């Protein structure tokens, strides 16, 4: 009587290569859908928006408590964050001790624990670090005008948001407030999703 033996065969090399290739294709597809770099940049932009909101709120609180802005000498000052001209556009905040405006007042220092305590010193240190995506400020010095705190978006989704505001959702009919920083929309035709995230060609996210 013959015994029948079941022969168990493993995968061939070709079959293993096919499986590995399929897994590789699926991995590439997943990474393309998730786009980790975009997600990282979006997270950074979300942080920049939060910081801009904090700084904007601190400036408003300072004004409410003192009757003048933290870059001004006093309530009678007509100083603006654009060095008194109203045409220089946005001012980049690169140092806690830099002066903003013609009165030469150190705005961030005045807002920190060394001044009005509207902002923590750790916040100031972080937003002026060389590795940070700097904040920019603008106020045209006209009574009742808003103070804008802006940043250059790094992610495609935030750049598209900025472009839509600058170009009224792509229609080209700009309906920005009259006190909006002139440099906030330097080139509405090139700062869409595919635009570069820099000051020369990109639209800014500006609050409010």
Image: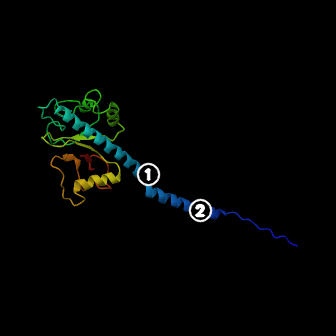
Q: How is the image coloured?
A: rainbow
Q: Secondary structure at mark 2?
A: helix
| Label 2, residues with CA under 10 Å away: few <14, some 14-19, many ≥20 | few
Element class at badge 1:
helix
Residue pointed to by mark 1:
36
Residue 13 horizontal side relative to residue 191, left or right: right
Q: Residue furthest top?
A: 114
Residue 24, given in percent of the width and then of the height, sits at: 54, 59
Where is mark 2, residue-wise? 19
Question: Is there any visible trace of residue 39 in the rendered image?
Answer: yes
Q: Residue furthest right?
A: 1
Question: Which residue sits at x=28%, y=42%?
Answer: 53
Q: Earlier in the sequence, mark 1 or mark 2?
A: 2
Give the left or right position of residue 119, taking residue 102 as reference.
right
Residue 85: % across, % down: 14, 39
* Disc sitting over residue 80 in the figure: none
In 3D space, how far apart are the residues under numbered discs 1 and 2 (Cα atoms)? 25 Å
146 or 45, which is in the foreground?
Answer: 146
Nearest the camera: 208 or 21? 208
Res 190 seen here: no
Is residue 34 shown above or below 47? below
Q: Nearer the viewer, residue 83 or 48?
A: 48
Viewed as shown, does residue 26 lie left or right of 76?
A: right
Residue depicted at x 67% and y 64%: 12
Tell me the residue at 70%/63% (across/down).
10
- Which x, y percent locates residue 41? 38, 48
Q: Quadrant of the N terminus?
A: bottom right
Asked if the residue at tag 2 contacts the one at tag 1, i.e. Cβ–Cβ closer than 8 Å, the answer is: no
| Label 1: few (<14), some (14–19) or many (≥20) C-alpha neighbours in 10 Å | few
Name the residue at 31% across, 45% down.
49
């Amino acid at each position: 009587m013959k015994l029948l033996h079941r022969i168990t065969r493993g995968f061939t090399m070709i079959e293993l290569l096919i499986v590995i290739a399929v897994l590789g294709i699926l991995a590439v597809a997943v990474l393309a859908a998730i786009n980790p770099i975009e997600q990282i940049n979006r997270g950074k932009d979300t942080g920049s928006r939060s910081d801009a909101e904090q700084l904007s709120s601190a400036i408003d609180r300072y004004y409410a408590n003192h009757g003048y802005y933290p870059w001004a000498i006093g309530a009678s000052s007509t100083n603006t964050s654009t060095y008194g001209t109203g045409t220089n556009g946005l001012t980049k905040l690169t140092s806690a001790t830099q002066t903003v405006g013609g009165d030469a007042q150190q705005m961030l220092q005045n807002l920190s624990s060394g001044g009005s305590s509207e902002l923590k010193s750790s916040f100031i240190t972080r937003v002026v670090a060389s590795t940070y995506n700097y904040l920019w400020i603008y106020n045209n010095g006209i009574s009742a005008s808003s103070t804008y705190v802006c940043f250059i978006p790094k992610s495609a989704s935030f750049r598209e948001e900025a472009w839509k505001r600058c170009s009224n959702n792509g229609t080209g009919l700009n309906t920005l407030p009259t006190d909006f920083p002139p440099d906030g929309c330097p080139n509405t035709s090139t700062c869409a999703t595919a635009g570069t995230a820099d000051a020369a060609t990109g639209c800014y996210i500006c609050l409010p």
